[in-house]
Amino acid sequence: MLGAGDRGAARARWLGTGLLGLFLLPVSLSLEVSVGKANTIYAVNSTEILLPCTFSSCFGFRDLGFWWSYNGSDTFKILINGTVKNEKSDPRVHLKNDDRITLEGSTKEKMNNISILLKDVDFSDTGKYTCYVKNPKEKDLQHHATIFLQVVDKLEEVDNTVTLIILAVVGGVIGLLIFILLLKKLITFILKKTQEKKKECLVSSSGNDNTENGLPGSKAEEKPPTKV
């Protein structure tokens, strides 16, 4: 059984661990780097491809450093690196190891975009492209994200026949239901108007005075006998 001193020490360690976790949690979630939702992108040989990368920091940034690396089957190299002075400054390139690469990013309107455009892609460009970001304002906290580029002869055409058939069937069913509802409303409207017209006719007929029109069933006014 633990003594009072041991229990106190255990509580202190638990409290210290909890406070440390609370302190580190915002830091670990502050700087984020993203290359989009797709893990793999495809490019046709001899064309160009945009390699996306954006970053965010809830603490802001100052003199933020960024760079892109390429990791192929037997090659690793830094493609480009640069800095972003602050939120109002565009990214600035310091080094570029491939003339086919241009920086397409901007920090204006809080886009924080440091994407690069790779022109005249070749099959040898197939591999992993990693975007790194380091923020001195967060004690040089660094994050990165990786995307895989696959260079192909041509992009495969997706057969959308089944999808188009399904959409056509669903659209036809929805159109038919709308037509039935409109037809139902039209029939209801016509029947209502017809019933109202019959009712008006009956009311008009019952109000006619048939006492002197000589029609069968009418009661003629009785005249007193003439005195001689």
Image (cartoon, rainbow, N blue to C red):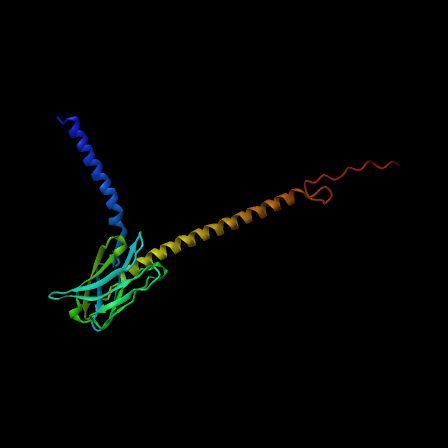
Q: Is residue 41 above or below residue 228?
A: below
Where residue 141 appears, as percent x and y from the top left, is: 23, 54
Residue 213 in the figure: left or right of residue 14: right
- Quarter of the rendering occupied by the C terminus: top right
Where residue 117 appears, as percent x and y from the top left, is: 26, 68
Q: Quadrant of residue 80?
A: bottom left
**Residue at position x 30%, y 61% from top?**
85
The answer to whether residue 155 is seen in the rendering is: no
Q: Quadrant of residue 175?
A: bottom left
Where residue 15 appears, as percent x and y from the top left, is: 22, 36
Where residue 83 appears, as percent x and y from the top left, is: 27, 63
Residue 192 in the figure: left or right of residue 74: right
- Quarter of the rendering occupied by the N terminus: top left
Residue 121 in the figure: left or right of residue 228: left
Q: Nearer the viewer, residue 1 or 154?
A: 1
**Residue at position x 24%, y 61% from top?**
66
**Residue at position x 23%, y 39% from top?**
18
Q: Is residue 141 above or below residue 71?
A: above
As drawn, the residue found furthest toward the right would be 228
Number of marks in the image? 0
